[in-house]
Amino acid sequence: MGIYDHVRTSERNAITAPLVKSTSTGFNDLPPELHLLISQQLIYPDALSLKHTNRYFRSLVDTGLELKVDWLIERRSLHLECPNDSRCDLGSDLKFCRGSIR
């Protein structure tokens, strides 16, 4: 006599079924707190890209003045191409350094 012979089929399936269902989890399935923490680690261009993926991230991701300035300072310190002053509007994501950097 096997160990499950006295158990009904439905109960046997419940006992032998995996405790955790195998489901794939994507970035969007993470809790909002993690989305916020991750977005705060991004440099300006990456944060802007994430912000433009959907309405949820548009309202969550901050691409304000501080992030833009930090990005510009980092580029200058690494001697990378930076936008010129005449074409850079820090007040708007749409106008920020538009066309002045490749």
Image (spheres, rainbow, N blue to C red):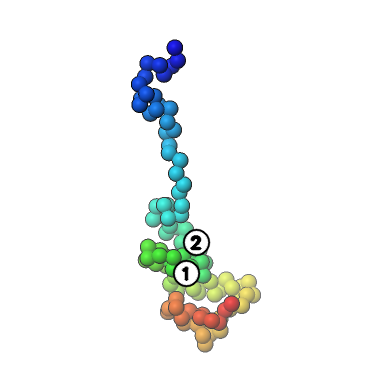
On the image, the x and y values in percent for residue 63 come to: 44, 70
- The tag earlier along the polypeptide, 1 or 2, is 2
Residue extending furthest toward the front? 9
Q: Secondary structure at mark 1?
A: helix
What's under tag 2, amino acid-wise?
A: Gln
Q: Position of residue 96 (x, y in %)?
A: 48, 79
> Which of the labelled discs sits on residue 48, or is there none?
1
36 to 66, vertically: above or below:
above
Residue to which mark 2 is pinned = 41
Mark 1, other Cα within 10 Å: few <14 / some 14–19 / many ≥20? some
The extreme top residue here reads: 1
Q: Secondary structure at mark 2?
A: loop
Packing grade of label 2 (10 A; few <14, some 14-19, many >=20) is: few
| Quarter containing the C terminus | bottom right
Question: Of 29 and 63, which appears nearest the observer?
Answer: 29
Residue located at (37% from left, 19% from top): 7
* Numbered disc in front, either 1 or 2: 1
Give, as a three-letter code, the residue at label 1: Leu
Question: In the depicted view, which residue is nearer to us: 11 or 63?
Answer: 11
